[in-house]
Image (tube, rainbow, N blue to C red):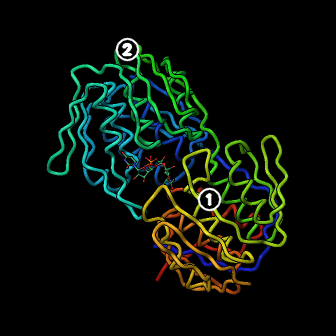
C-alpha cells in the first residue's frame, strides 16, 4: 500500500494540462464491442479504472494494446458475453458492457454491480431502458441474465437523468430495429462524446447534450478512430488546487463551457479567473463561504463536491453544501475534521464554518473524489498531512503528485508501513 505525504502552505504556480476524461473513455471503450474490428482511441488516461476495463474486455476476447495515450482495441475475437463477479465488483463501470454486448450478441450475463463508498448505485433505470427495447431481464443468485431475440426501438423515459443508464440505452439502441427516443436523458459532456464516437462507427444518434436523444437503428457498425474529450473533473480539481493554495495556476486543454458551474462558484467564493478558449487561469484572494447544490449537468458536478468542500473549509463565513445525486458522498468530512475543519452533516447537507487554517494530520482516502479533496486540503494545511489508501485516488486522477509537484507542491508517494 502507498500513501501521500504532503507539506502544506505552499503556493501553487504554473501551468497544468489535463488529459482525456475517464468517464468518457470507459463507455467509449465498451462501445467498441458493438462491432468486429480494430478501433483506435486517443488520449485515454492512464488510470486503474481504465486498466480494469481493459482486463474485463480482454477476458471477453478483445485484444487491446496501449501505445502511449492511445488504445488499439481489436474486438474481432470476442467470444464471451459474461462478466464475472470479481471483475464487476472491482469496477462497477463494467455495467457499461451491457448495452454493447446486448446490441451485438443479444445476450449478456453479469453479476450485480456492487454499491460503492458513495452509495447503493442501483441499475434499475438501465434495466428498465433495456426492457423497453425488448430485452428479457432475469435477476437471480446475484446475476443478471439479459436476452433479446431482437432489439426494437422504443420511447424510454428515465425517472432520473442517469449518466450510465443513458449511455447503456444509447449503445443498445444503435443496432436495434427502428427509432429509440430517450427522454430525460443525462446531458453530461461525456454523453456527447459517446454520441460522437457511435456516429463515427456509422450509428445515427442525435440530441446528446440535451434531455432528449434520438437513435435511428442501423444494421451494422464499423470500427472507428476517436480522441477522448478532456477531463472536466480533473480540470476542476486543479482549479480548486490553485485557489486553495492561494497560487496562480493555468489549467490547459479544457472546454470552459463544461466548467461553467465551477467557474461561477469559484468566482463567487472570491477566486479571480481568466477564461480563455481552451484554458483557465485561477488566482485567489480573500475566500468567502457560499452555498452549493450538486445537480445533473449543467448543474454543479457531484464529482467536484468533495474538492470544493475542502476549499470552503477555509473560506470566511458559513457555507452550505447539498449533495443531491448520491446518498453517501460526505465521507471526506470526517477526515477534514481531523484537519481542523468545522463541518456538520445532516442527511444530504453539510454546513461548513470556515476556519483560518487547517492543520496537517494522518487521514485516509475513503473514495476517489474524497481522496482528491484530502490532497487539496493538505496543500493548504499547516504542517504535514499523510493520506492513506491512495489507490482510490489513482482510479481517477492521472499523475496527480507529478502534476502538483510541477506546480510547486511538496508531495511524495511513499510506501505505507
Ligand atoms: C457516472 O456514474 C460517473 N461514472 C460518476 O463518476 C458520476 O458521479 C455520475 O455519473 C454522476 O455524474 C462514470 O461515468 C464511470 P448516475 P453513474 O447513473 O452513471 C441513481 C467518478 O467519481 N441511479 O448518473 O453510476 C444513482 O444511485 C464517478 O468519476 C438509480 O437510482 O451515475 C445515483 O444516485 C463517481 N438507478 C444517481 O442516479 C439507476 O439505474 C446518479 O447516478 C442508475 C442510477
Q: Tell me the distance, in whole angstroms, between the alpha carbons under discs 2 and 1.
A: 44 Å
Q: What is the quadrant of residue 320 in the picture?
A: bottom right
Identify the element where label 1 is drawn.
loop
- Along the line of sight, the residue nearer the viewer: 378 or 300: 300
Disc 1 crowd, CA 10 A, few/some/many (<14, 14-19, 20+): some
Q: Position of residue 34 (x, y in %)?
A: 39, 26
Locate residue 18 relative to residue 60 in the image: left or right.
Answer: right
256 relative to 361 in the view: left or right: right
What is the number of the mark on residue 178? 2
* Disc assigned to residue 109: none
Give coordinates of residue 39: x percent, y percent.
49, 27
Q: Nearer the viewer, mark 2 or mark 1?
A: 2
Nearest to N terminus: mark 2 or mark 1: 2
Tell me the quarter of the picture where residue 277 sits: top right
* Crowd class of label 2 (few under 14; some 14 to 19; many from 20; radius 10 Å): some
Q: Quadrant of the N terminus?
A: bottom left
| Residue 399 numbered tag | 1
- The residue nearer to you, when weighing 325 against 138, is 325
Amino acid at each position: 500500500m502507498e500513501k501521500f505525504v504532503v507539506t502544506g502552505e505552499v503556493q501553487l504556480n504554473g501551468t497544468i494540462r489535463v488529459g482525456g476524461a475517464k468517464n468518457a473513455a470507459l463507455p467509449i471503450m465498451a462501445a467498441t464491442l458493438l462491432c468486429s474490428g480494430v478501433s483506435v482511441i486517443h488520449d485515454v488516461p492512464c488510470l486503474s479504472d481504465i486498466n480494469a476495463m481493459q482486463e474485463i474486455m480482454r477476458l471477453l476476447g478483445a485484444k487491446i494494446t496501449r501505445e502511449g495515450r492511445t488504445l488499439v482495441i481489436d474486438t474481432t475475437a470476442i467470444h464471451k458475453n459474461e462478466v464475472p463477479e470479481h471483475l464487476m465488483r472491482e469496477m462497477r463501470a463494467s455495467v457499461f458492457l451491457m448495452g454493447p454486448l446486448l446490441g451485438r450478441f443479444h445476450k449478456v450475463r453479469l453479476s450485480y454491480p456492487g454499491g460503492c463508498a458513495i452509495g447503493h448505485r442501483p441499475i434499475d433505470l438501465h434495466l428498465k431502458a433495456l426492457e423497453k427495447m425488448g430485452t428479457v431481464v432475469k435477476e437471480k443468485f446475484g446475476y443478471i441474465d439479459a436476452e433479446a431475440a431482437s432489439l426494437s426501438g422504443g420511447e424510454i423515459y428515465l425517472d432520473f437523468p442517469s449518466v450510465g443508464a443513458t449511455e447503456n440505452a444509447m449503445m443498445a439502441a444503435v443496432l436495434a430495429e427502428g427509432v429509440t427516443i430517450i427522454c430525460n436523458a443525462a446531458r453530461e459532456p461525456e454523453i456527447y462524446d459517446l454520441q460522437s464516437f457511435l456516429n463515427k462507427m456509422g450509428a445515427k444518434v442525435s440530441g446528446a447534450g440535451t434531455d432528449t436523444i434520438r437513435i435511428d437503428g442501423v444494421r451494422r457498425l464499423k470500427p472507428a478512430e476517436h480522441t477522448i474529450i478532456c477531463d472536466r473533473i480533473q480540470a476542476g480539481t486543479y482549479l480548486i488546487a490553485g485557489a486553495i493554495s492561494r497560487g496562480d495556476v493555468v489549467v490547459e486543454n479544457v472546454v470552459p463551457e463544461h466548467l461553467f458551474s465551477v467557474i461561477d462558484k469559484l468566482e463567487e467564493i472570491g477566486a479571480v479567473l481568466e477564461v480563455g478558449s481552451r484554458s483557465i487561469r485561477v488566482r485567489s484572494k480573500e475566500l468567502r463561504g457560499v452555498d452549493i447544490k450538486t445537480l445533473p449537468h449543467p448543474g454543479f458536478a457531484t464529482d467536484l463536491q468533495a474538492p470544493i468542500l475542502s476549499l470552503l473549509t477555509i473560506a470566511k463565513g458559513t457555507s452550505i453544501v447539498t449533495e443531491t445525486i448520491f446518498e453517501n458522498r460526505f465521507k471526506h468530512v470526517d477526515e477534514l475534521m481531523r484537519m481542523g475543519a468545522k463541518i456538520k452533516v445532516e442527511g444530504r447537507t453539510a454546513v461548513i464554518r470556515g476556519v483560518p487554517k487547517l492543520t496537517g494530520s494522518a487521514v485516509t482516502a475513503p473514495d476517489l473524489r474524497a481522496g482528491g479533496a484530502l490532497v487539496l486540503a493538505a496543500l493548504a494545511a499547516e504542517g504535514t498531512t499523510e493520506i492513506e489508501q491512495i489507490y482510490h485516488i489513482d482510479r481517477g486522477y492521472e499523475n496527480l503528485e507529478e502534476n502538483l509537484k510541477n506546480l510547486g507542491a511538496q508531495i511524495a508517494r511513499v510506501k505505507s508501513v
